[in-house]
Amino acid sequence: MKDVLEHIAKALVDNPDAVVVTQDEGDRGTVLRLQVDPDDMGKVIGRGGRTARAIRSVMKAAAIKADARIHVEIVD
């Protein structure tokens, strides 16, 4: 799952080398934390949070297919 999120984020940003995805196991399942270059933060979040919601929806669909629980956080 970590690789899927990293691939999506790198496709969206201008500085793909700055994309970092960390994975932790939490009480709600797997928590993926996405960190990007501060200049690319707006591209990942999108207007009104639309892009962030779309990323979370895609990750949720991938998690359901893999029979897992995923929560995506975008970190400053």
Image (spheres, grey):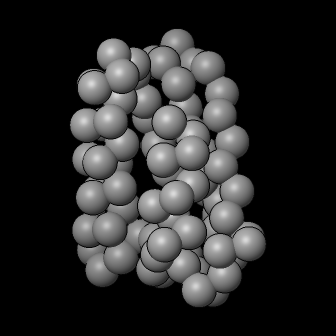
In the rendered image, which quarter is residue 22 located in? top right
Which residue is pictured at 33% across the width and 36% down the height? 62
Picture coordinates of residue 72 (x, y %)?
Answer: 47, 43
Near-viewer residue (27 or 22) = 22
Picture coordinates of residue 20 (x, y %)?
Answer: 70, 56
In the rendered image, which quarter is residue 24 located in? top right
Which residue is pictured at 65% across the width and 74% down the height? 16
| Count of numbered circles on the image | 0
Q: Is residue 57 above or below residue 54?
A: above
Near-viewer residue (69 or 27) = 69
Picture coordinates of residue 49 (x, y %)?
Answer: 32, 68
Q: Is residue 5 above or below residue 24?
A: below
In the rendered image, which quarter is residue 59 located in? top left
Res 62 visible: yes
Which residue is pictured at 42% across the width and 70% down the height? 45
Res 74 visible: no
Residue 4 falls left or right of residue 14 = left
Q: Which residue is most to the right?
A: 17
Say which quadrant the C terminus sits in: bottom right
Q: Is residue 50 above or below residue 7?
A: below
Q: Is residue 58 above or below residue 76?
A: above
